[in-house]
Image (cartoon, grey):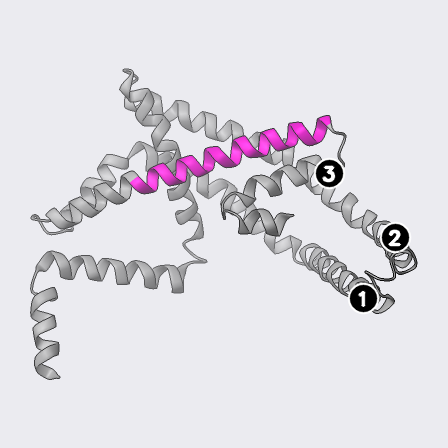
Amino acid sequence: MLKLLKTLAVKYFSDEEAVVLFLILVASLLAVIFLGRMLAPVIAALIVAFILQGLVGKLKAVGVPHLLAVIGVFLFFLGALVSFIFGMLPLIWSQVSALAIELPRMIRATQRYLEVLPQEYPQLVSIEEVNALFQQLTAEVGKVTQWLVSISLESIPNVVALLIYLILVPILVFFFLKDRDSILQFLGRLLPANRPLMNTIWDEMNLQFANYVRGKALEILIVGIVTYVSFTLLGLNYSLLLALLVGISVVIPYIGAAVVT
């Protein structure tokens, strides 16, 4: 057994690059597990900067200087963020509140409809099944109501944390975009000079992850806009709230759509 462990250690950990890569992965995992809440603004800023870096790269490719490209993309991001906070967010919250107020009436209407089913289709639906379904529906609505109440009770500390995030994250996004090359060079000096494996993994992950994240962000935006326009033209209530949920649902294929439905 000891001989086997020694053989594995020599095979996989005699290479300095492999050891450093293993330690980086372990340290990153531990940081997310134990410091995830503290590092949330940094992680959020990294994700946003990673998405926006594609726009910066396209502007630089047509001859725009790096700093001007960063400023232009950052102003676009800032404008979108402000529009969402002061434009969409109040509408979404008002629709959530209206839906919560409307729930009792919807439950009563559903109850009246369910009570008719055993009389109209006794061979398909029994009174016991209707009662069980109504009890389950009432329980789910109670959970939603409790969740809304808990949000209201915890709103003050959440608002303070949100204000901090709204200030800190955009600042971090700007500096991550502006100093991206300097940050990568600094991190590169901490790694072994000869690191072909790390370079290969980084290039592959950067390409695949960039395509996935930017593609998924674009998909959320397109699906959300198309859904909102469609629901609005159909005169559906809570169109903005439903469009937001449908847009977010594409993050998890199939399962997300089923949950939102």
Does the magenta segment cover residue 225?
yes
Does the magenta segment cover residue 152?
no
Mark drawn on residue 56 = none
The picture quadrant where one finds residue 172 is top left
Lower position in the chain sequence, tag 3 or tag 1: 1
Q: Report the side of 214 relative to 139 (left or right).
A: left
Lower position in the chain sequence, tag 1 or tag 2: 2
Amino acid type of disc 2? Answer: Tyr
Decide if residue 159 is in sight here: no
Amino acid type of disc 3? Answer: Tyr
The picture quadrant where one finds residue 23 is bottom left
Q: Nearer the viewer, mark 3 or mark 1?
A: 1
Magenta stretch?
Answer: 208-233
x and y percentages locating residue 81 in the rendered image = 53, 33
Q: Report the side of 128 relative to 196 (left or right).
A: right
Circle 3 crowding by C-alpha within 10 Å: few under 14, some 14–19, many from 20: some
Q: Report the side of 127 relative to 91 (left or right).
A: right
Amino acid type of disc 1? Answer: Glu
Q: Secondary structure at mark 3?
A: loop
Report which residue position mark 2 lands on.
113
Question: CA separation, marks 3 and 2?
Answer: 22 Å
Lower position in the chain sequence, tag 3 or tag 2: 2
Q: Nearer the viewer, mark 3 or mark 2?
A: 2
Mark drawn on residue 129 = 1
The residue shown at (78%, 63%) is 133
x and y percentages locating residue 40 in the rendered image = 44, 52
Report which residue position mark 3 lands on.
238
Question: CA separation, marks 1 and 2?
Answer: 14 Å
